[in-house]
Image (cartoon, grey):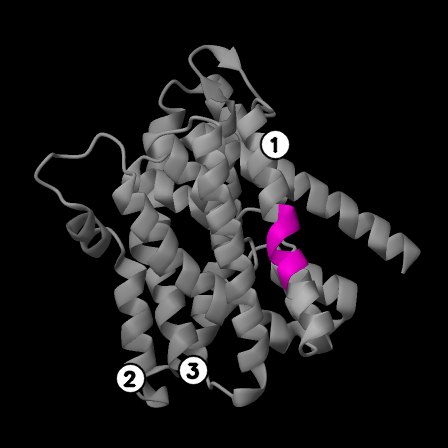
């Protein structure tokens, strides 16, 4: 699915002049239609428990550490505006859904999926919908001067309202068939996201640019993303309290495809985000192959 989506995006960018516009429409469909539906039905059926609280707290500490370090490194590198916003978001937005769930099942077995899903819902989703979209609103590019950051956050974040609604409504409004449809849309999001990634990573005027440039900033944000969250999680688990192995796997996932939604909503630097996704994903997949051989 990764290769098919990327390949389709690369070919489209090479053969169609309107490829970027097409990719942006695909992301808009995901942002305004698919993601709110998926978010609503998943959170409507969610049942919290005290046992996962410690692991979630450690995960939040890891994400916050990655964001703080990314902010300092971005200043050190002289990044500003929508590029700094993209750098910061790429450092903590994780691919715990499209890649993390099948990756965990393949590495640890299907019994580990409930914990992996919990991480995706209670860590990745809130950090995307609240923290990343807040950063996008603050560092957005080419916005009307009358549009404040708070207004941009509230008007371009439909999945946030779906999350709140899902938590408030009774389970009866999320029947099994509706949840199954929502999960099917999750599968549909993957090829759409990788298609947009292939376009954004390739399109640069008339030149063919895949893989995207491996700049100093992309190397730095990739190191932060793959190193900091999982290191903090592992350290807390070793020193304070054990966490599910699935939490450690999810904390090590690459920059998420959902960060492309920030390109669509707030015009963050697409080259930065595309580069982070491509190179962190490649490294995680390589690590997975090695782990499967050795394990």
* Comes first in the chain, label 2 or label 1: 2
Q: Are marks 3 and 1 in contact (CB under 8 Å)?
A: no
Residue placed most toward the observer, 126 or 31: 126
The percent coordinates of residue 117 (x first, y second) are: 56, 71
Q: How many marks?
A: 3
Rendered position, 130 above or below 84: below
Residue highlighted by disc 2: 169
* Structural crowding at the residue carrying mark 3, measured as other residues with C-alpha within 10 Å and reported as few (<14), some (14–19) or many (≥20): some
Q: Residues within 10 Å of mark 1 (few under 14, many from 20)?
A: some
**Label 2, label 1: how far apart the Cα atoms are:** 43 Å
**Range of the magenta residues?**
226-232
Residue topped by disc 3: 45
Which residue matches tag 1? 219
Residue sitting at x 46%, y 28% = 271
Look at the magenta stretch and give its main secondary structure.
Answer: helix
Q: Nearer the viewer, mark 3 or mark 1?
A: 1
Residue 104 falls within the magenta-colored stretch: no
Dot 2, how many residues are within 10 Å of its Cα: few (below 14), some (14-19), or many (20+)? some
**Frontmost residue, 36 versus 11:** 36
Q: Quadrant of the C terminus?
A: bottom right
110 up-or-down from 208: above or below: below
Tell me which residue sits at (47%, 49%) in the image. 68
Q: Nearer the viewer, residue 19 or 73?
A: 73
Q: Is residue 70 left or right of residue 171?
A: right
Residue 30 image point, x, y percent: 37, 51
Q: Earlier in the sequence, mark 3 or mark 1?
A: 3
Q: Secondary structure at mark 3?
A: loop
Q: Is residue 62 visible?
A: yes
Instruction: Determine the CA span between mark 3 and mark 1.
Output: 39 Å
Q: Toward which corner of the image does residue 263 lie, by quadrant?
A: top left
Vertical placement of residue 216 versus 136, above or below: above
N-terminal-most mark, 2 or 3: 3
């Amino acid at each position: 699915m990764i290769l098919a989506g990327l390949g389709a995006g690369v070919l489209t960018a090479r053969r169609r002049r309107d490829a970027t516009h097409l990719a942006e429409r695909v992301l808009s469909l995901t942002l305004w239609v698919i993601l709110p539906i998926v978010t609503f039905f998943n959170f409507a059926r969610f049942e919290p428990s005290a046992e996962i609280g410690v692991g979630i707290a450690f995960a939040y500490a890891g994400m916050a550490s990655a964001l703080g370090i990314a902010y300092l490194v971005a200043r050190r590198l002289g990044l500003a505006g929508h590029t700094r916003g993209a750098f910061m978001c790429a450092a903590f937005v994780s691919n715990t859904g499209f890649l993390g769930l099948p990756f965990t099942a393949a590495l640890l077995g299907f019994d580990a999926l409930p914990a992996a899903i919990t991480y995706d819902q209670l860590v990745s989703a809130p950090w995307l919908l609240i923290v990343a979209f807040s950063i996008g609103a603050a560092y957005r590019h080419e916005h009307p001067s009358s549009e404040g950051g708070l207004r941009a956050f509230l008007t371009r974040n439909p999945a946030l309202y779906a999350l709140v609604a899902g938590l408030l409504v009774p389970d009866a409004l999320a029947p099994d068939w509706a949840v199954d449809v929502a999960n099917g849309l999750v599968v549909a999001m993957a090829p759409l996201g990788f298609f947009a990634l292939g376009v954004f990573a390739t399109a640069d005027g008339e030149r063919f640019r895949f893989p995207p440039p491996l700049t100093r900033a992309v190397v730095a944000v990739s190191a932060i993303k793959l190193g900091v969250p999982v290191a903090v999680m592992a350290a807390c688990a070793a020193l304070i309290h054990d966490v599910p192995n699935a939490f450690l796997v999810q904390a090590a996932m690459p920059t998420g495809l959902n960060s492309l939604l920030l390109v669509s909503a707030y015009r963050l630097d697409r080259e930065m985000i595309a580069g982070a996704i491509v190179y962190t994903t490649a490294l995680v997949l390589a690590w997975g192959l090695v782990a499967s051989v050795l394990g």
